[in-house]
Amino acid sequence: MNVKMDSLPWHFFILFLHILLSTVSSSACSLENKQALLQFKSSVIRDPASASFSGDQSWNSSSVCCSWEGVRCRNQLVTELHLTNVFTGYNTKALSNLFLIKSLTLLNASSSFLHGEIPANNLSSLSKLEYLDLSSNHINGSIPDQLFSLPNLKHLSLQSNRLSASSNASSHGFIDSRLEYLDLSFNNFNGPIPFQVYNLTNLKYLALSGTHLSGSLRSNIGSLLRLEILNLEDNSLHGSLPPEIGKLQKLRILLLSSNNFSGEIPNSISNLTQLKKLDISYNNLFSVIPESIGELRNISDILLNQNNLTGGIPMSMQELSKLESLDLNGNSLSGYIPTILFELNRLKILNLAGNSLSWNSTAKISPTCLFSELYLKSCRIIGEIPRWLSGQKDLQNLDLSNNMLSGEIPSWFAELRIQSIILSDNKLTGKLPPSLFESQILSFLDLSINMLEGELPKNIGNASSLEGLLLSSNSFHGPLPESMSNLLYIWMLDLSYNNISGNILHSLIPGLNYLDLSSNNFSGQLPVELTSMDSLKVLELHDNRLTGELPVSFSKISCLQVLNVRNNNIGGLIPASLAELSKLWFIDLSHNKLTGEIPTELGDLPYLQYTHSNESYFSDYFLSGQSEYYNQHLIIDWKGSVIDVTGSRANLFMTLDLSNNQLSGGIPASLGNLRALKSLHLSFNELTGGIPAELGRLENIESMFLSNNKLTGEIPQTFVELRELTTLDLSNNKLVGQIPTGGQMSAMTDPSSYVNNSDLCGFQIGVQCKSVSPSGGLQGSSNTGDEGDEWLSWEATAVGYSVGFFLAIGIAYFIGIFHPKSRQ
Ligand SMILES: *[C@@H]1O[C@H](CO)[C@@H](O)[C@H](O)[C@H]1NC(C)=O
Ligand SMILES: *[C@@H]1O[C@H](CO)[C@@H](O)[C@H](O)[C@H]1NC(C)=O
Ligand SMILES: *[C@@H]1O[C@H](CO)[C@@H](O)[C@H](O)[C@H]1NC(C)=O
Ligand SMILES: *[C@@H]1O[C@H](CO)[C@@H](O)[C@H](O)[C@H]1NC(C)=O
Ligand SMILES: *[C@@H]1O[C@H](CO)[C@@H](O)[C@H](O)[C@H]1NC(C)=O
Ligand SMILES: *[C@@H]1O[C@H](CO)[C@@H](O)[C@H](O)[C@H]1NC(C)=O
Ligand SMILES: *[C@@H]1O[C@H](CO)[C@@H](O)[C@H](O)[C@H]1NC(C)=O
Ligand SMILES: *[C@@H]1O[C@H](CO)[C@@H](O)[C@H](O)[C@H]1NC(C)=O
Ligand SMILES: *[C@@H]1O[C@H](CO)[C@@H](O)[C@H](O)[C@H]1NC(C)=O
Ligand SMILES: *[C@@H]1O[C@H](CO)[C@@H](O)[C@H](O)[C@H]1NC(C)=O
Ligand SMILES: *[C@@H]1O[C@H](CO)[C@@H](O)[C@H](O)[C@H]1NC(C)=O
Ligand SMILES: *[C@@H]1O[C@H](CO)[C@@H](O)[C@H](O)[C@H]1NC(C)=O
């Protein structure tokens, strides 16, 4: 006993010393580990792609390796390596040195600009590895099967790389895998879901989104019984959803959106009692929403939008007492909108837009939920704006557009704290309640296409948060309120198709991106203040009574893309400085009183000089809007029709229209540089001289109107190069000689395109040329060939008629991006 008592302090001392040493010298690590780390470092440094080594100073052979940046040890063995901020930009080969550290439990080299393939060498020695994160690098090649054989690996993150599908060599490693977390999203597995995945039965988290997967989701998914989160979004998976999904009873989040799944939502989904979020939006589901959906008592988000679901909204949904958001937008649902939806206490976001639903807004309902977002666009709602909305104190976004709402805009709207109100395309009458504009929260108001009338309220400028105001196609009259210029945050103002009069000065707010005042009664001179609007991208002033001249300093509006002042009384010269607007691609100055010559400089318009085939236009169009639609779409007025020219569709509408003015002089040869141009209109002017042969370089031109001028000489032979030409009008000039044959010119056989000229001939108009014209433009007389052959062959050529432009407009019509703006 005594002996023990005596020796105890010693034991304590030794123990204490041991603890002290292992703490103080925790920075010591085994020689083997140190060598592996140094070899890793030297192969990183040797890599020519290696960029910066913020932490490598500490990785130095004369210091102890457990103190190096990113290195963690336990019992003098390296266990964790956090390399993200230590080394960047090296080949993954270097990692194989680290694979020799058998004690490693964690390796994190995410976001490190790694390139190359994951080395399979020595990988299987990592028997203690639990956590591997190589996400957000540039790793390519396939995933070595050895990774899945690591007996302790639980967490594997390889998302955002360039990996392709795992080799098929062996799958038995997967069977014993302990993997619980697998994120392979944003890689390049072109092909089916790797079959090995179905054997990873310990998985709780599986993410394969954005990996270019195709094929179907196999019923084996039902063997992943521990799965809590499954994310297969953004692939090309097709086929129906296997009923075995219902076996995954621990599932909390199921994300299948943006695939091509078809068929029905399996009834077995009712087994997923833990499910909180279900997203199958953007697929091809048809059939009805199963009644069994009412069993998902724990669900808070259901997103089934953009499918083709039919039938009614199931009554069983009244059981979903935890539902917070329901998006059924863009399906083919029918029947009445059931009252039960308004009695789901927690529902905040409801989107039923774009179905075949209907609703009588006078139906007596007293919602027990407080919506924050309510979208009932195109729900065939009849009646007045429902009174119960006045109790919706949390409402931020309201869209009731494209319905049959009648009556006046209630003044209690102003008491709500709504940010975005969209009531366009209804039958609303009466005046704009001034109280609406006392809101300091309202940022987007769209009341277009209604039957509203009266003057714009004087206090419009009090709505200090307003970013978008769209009042087009109503019957507003009177002048612009002075206070309008107080709307400092406004980027979109559309007052088109009303009867507003007076001058436009108060609408010239410097921050505007989009200003549409067209088809009103505005008069007075174009104010010079116009040129201080340096954010303006679209300026639509057509069909008014504006006078004055285009300011010489127009070039200050440097972002301008669309300029339309058609049908006003604008005189003076066309400012040559227009050509400095580097983004301008739509110019309509027609039906005015412009005089002088067409500036040669217009041929320098930068944007129209090159074909922008795959460019996406205006993706950055409006940055801060409330309404997604207006955020992403650019709408222009093209010859009286409203057209959405978002994306590369803008290519179809590249226009220069100077017709119906009093322009004189010749057509500048420089216009031949505008190779992106689709239509050129110079008709009804007093242009003289010949048609420049250079116009034959307009390789994208589809319509060209030069009629009703005083043009002389021959039609240039170069016109046979205009491969896209579908419409040509040269009538009412003084042209002579043979109409060129060949290319699309052989298809331009409408005689009215050539009437009232001096002496034209050619098979197109059925007038035989008396003698073969010796001057054939740039092409010489190569096309003069055998007249008889031409007479026979022109009809055959016409079959090859290019229909690009009008076909595009036709399609636009069908897919609904093309609709008349005025109600009349
Ligand atoms: C290694 O680090 C120590 C102290 O941090 C320093 O004194 C020494 O110069 C370094 N050696 C090299 C080769 O960088
Ligand atoms: C791995 O590194 C990434 C990026 O630095 C970080 O977000 C993540 O939390 C790290 N993981 C662990 C377990 O430290
Ligand atoms: C590591 O891999 C290399 C190359 O395959 C091999 O020569 C070496 O023996 C391996 N080292 C260990 C410790 O497994
Ligand atoms: C991986 O990328 C490198 C270039 O970074 C390339 O040489 C190699 O062939 C690629 N490997 C695979 C399997 O694609
Ligand atoms: C792996 O794929 C190749 C060709 O893709 C095939 O020849 C081979 O039989 C496959 N191996 C296994 C084990 O499936
Ligand atoms: C592994 O997956 C394959 C195909 O998915 C399946 O046939 C096999 O039964 C699975 N093996 C185990 C042990 O789960
Ligand atoms: C759903 O759950 C029931 C009872 O728990 C079970 O009998 C049935 O097989 C499950 N359905 C599916 C498709 O897993
Ligand atoms: C989706 O399916 C439809 C018809 O089933 C097909 O036309 C379409 O090409 C498919 N899309 C993809 C991306 O697989
Ligand atoms: C909802 O989830 C909780 C906990 O996740 C669970 O205890 C409960 O049984 C679930 N409710 C239903 C109706 O299954
Ligand atoms: C949607 O389903 C209906 C009825 O099944 C069908 O007539 C229609 O063509 C489908 N629409 C689309 C876009 O697939
Ligand atoms: C709409 O509902 C009201 C009140 O319930 C009723 O009087 C009216 O007839 C209904 N209108 C239509 C078209 O069903
Ligand atoms: C609102 O506008 C009116 C008229 O412009 C002005 O007299 C009034 O002071 C404004 N109210 C507020 C709160 O700014």
Image (cartoon, rainbow, N blue to C red):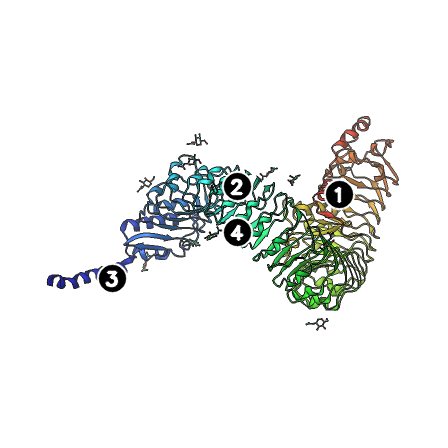
Kind of residue sitting beneath label 4: Ile
Q: Position of residue 487 (x, y in %)?
A: 68, 66
Kind of residue sitting beneath label 3: Leu
Q: Nearer the viewer, residue 492 or 361?
A: 361
Q: CA distance from mark 4 to mark 3?
A: 53 Å
Label whose residue precedes the other's in the sequence (2 or 4):
2
Q: CA distance from mark 4 to mark 1?
A: 64 Å
Q: Nearer the viewer, residue 13 or 35?
A: 13
Task: For marks 4 and 1, give the one nearer the viewer.
Answer: 4
Q: CA distance from mark 2 to mark 3?
A: 55 Å
Left or right for 647, reference 701: left
Task: For marks 1 and 2, give the one nearer the viewer.
Answer: 2
For residue 20, the mark is: 3
Kind of residue sitting beneath label 2: His
For residue 757, the mark is: none
Q: CA distance from mark 2 to mark 4?
A: 29 Å
Please tell me how crowded label 4 is: few (under 14), some (14-19), or many (20+) other residues with Cα within 10 Å. Answer: many
Q: Write down which quadrant ligand 2 falls in.
A: bottom left
Q: Which residue is mark 4?
A: 299
Q: Secondary structure at mark 3?
A: helix
Q: CA distance from mark 1 to mark 2?
A: 45 Å
Q: Position of residue 32 (x, y in %)?
A: 28, 49
For residue 695, the mark is: 1
Label whose residue precedes the other's in the sequence (1 or 3):
3
Q: Which residue is mark 2?
A: 212
Can residue 2 be seen by looking at this rendering?
yes
- Distance from mark 1 CB to nearest ligand 8 atom below 8 Å: no
